[in-house]
Amino acid sequence: MLRLHFTVEDLGRVRVEVLGPLAETVLGLWNLQRRDAKALFGGWRARTGPLVTGDGPHIARFLGSPAGGLVDLFTLVGSAGCLGEGLERLAGAPADRLCEEFAVCAGTDRVRARWLAGLAGADRRSVGRLAQALRDCHRVAVAPYWGSIRHHLDGEVARQGRLMVGGGVAALLDGMRPMAVWKPPVLEVPDYRPLIHPVADYHLGGRPLVLAPSVFCGPVPQLFAGPRADSVVMVYPALRDPVDAAALWAPPADARRAGAPVPPALAALLGRTRAIVLCVIADHPACTTTQLSRRAGISPASASEHAATLRGAGLTRLARERKNALHSLTRLGAVLLDGVGGDGNGADGHCDVDVIGRAASRR
């Protein structure tokens, strides 16, 4: 059991925050090695496991295993809205902080590749290789679902915010049942399993508590409190409903959108994801990048990248309304969609290149 003790001042410092894609990637690699909660993660594990190759399996075992502690990159890096930001902070972290964090791996059997030993000494080449491996793992394990994951986590933060508005921090902490039980001034996590002592009493000591919802954490909240970290982070499971999980892990290729299916000729010409993006913009004029990412089933960064490519080709345009960037179809884009959706499909399912010529001539 974990008992987290609060003072009156501590209660005023509690906040809820999404840690970002780097944290979800690390937790995802940890989850990938687990065998529990099959109703929530079975489909994702089955699809993702074979895709984690190269250095991926090595860093998964190195950073965390179900039988041992989890390397805490969250308090080291902090909340990072995009993967690149998180990895940049990791690469620039002071050597002594890196050594301190990776010391949790000492004496374990998790090191399967020689280069990982360099992390214990904060060797910059090893840290760079770790960052690249995390990038590769994120690409196959998290990025395809990031739009849906972020939407789900934002919904959880909003739910917690409503609890705080209605009843203060006490209502927020009380709402964490059954995974945690609020017995003022102590928050108890009954199923928490520290590595050494059967019961752990933790005092915040003036540091703020960050409650961080995570899709991949589970089933028990985990406490991360580095000795020199500015805050204490409690990562807790935000995915608890198998119905939500089924929607979250729907294969990206099957992402739904309103309107007609993506024409095969258009997918052959642009690539399936970019074709989906173009069709979503056609079906939802003046959509924001966030709306585009959700409807296309891709991450906001990927949606922005594909939209920029389509805009560069003259198929879409961008308009600004206050703080929002709104995507819409150009006349050329409409002509292209009309062509491949109608007589532009050859008998073999490939795009008739004359369609592009006709579209360009009308631009």
Image (tube, rainbow, N blue to C red):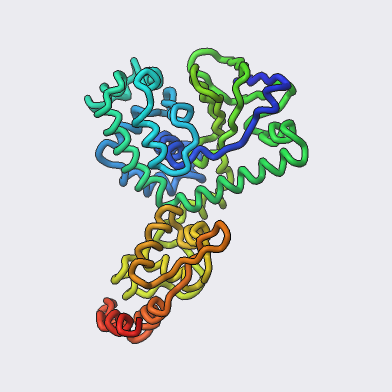
Measuring 44% from the left and 23% from the top, which residue is drawn there? 69
Residue reaching furthest to the bottom:
343
Number of callouts:
0
Q: Is residue 302 left or right of residue 121?
A: right
Measuring 47% from the left and 30% from the top, which residue is drawn there? 74
Measuring 57% from the left and 38% from the top, which residue is drawn there? 17
Residue 274 on image: x %, y %: 37, 64
Quadrant where the N terminus is found in the figure: top right
Is residue 103 placed above or below 176 in the rendered structure?
above
Quadrant where the C terminus is found in the figure: bottom left
Report which quarter residue 223 is drawn in: top right
Residue 170 visible in rendering: yes
- Asked whether 98 or 245 is in front, the reply is 98
Residue 78 on image: x %, y %: 48, 32
Report which quarter residue 336 is drawn in: bottom left
Measuring 49% from the left and 61% from the top, which residue is drawn there? 292
Residue 112 visible in rendering: no
Residue reaching furthest to the left:
114
Residue reaching furthest to the right:
167
Residue 117 on image: x %, y %: 26, 22
Residue 295 on image: x %, y %: 50, 62
- Asked whether 176 or 89 is in front, the reply is 89
Q: Is residue 8 left or right of residue 41?
A: right
Is residue 354 placed above or below 26 in the rendered structure?
below
Report which quarter residue 4 is drawn in: top right
- Asked whether 172 or 43 is in front, the reply is 172
Q: Is residue 177 left or right of residue 320?
A: right
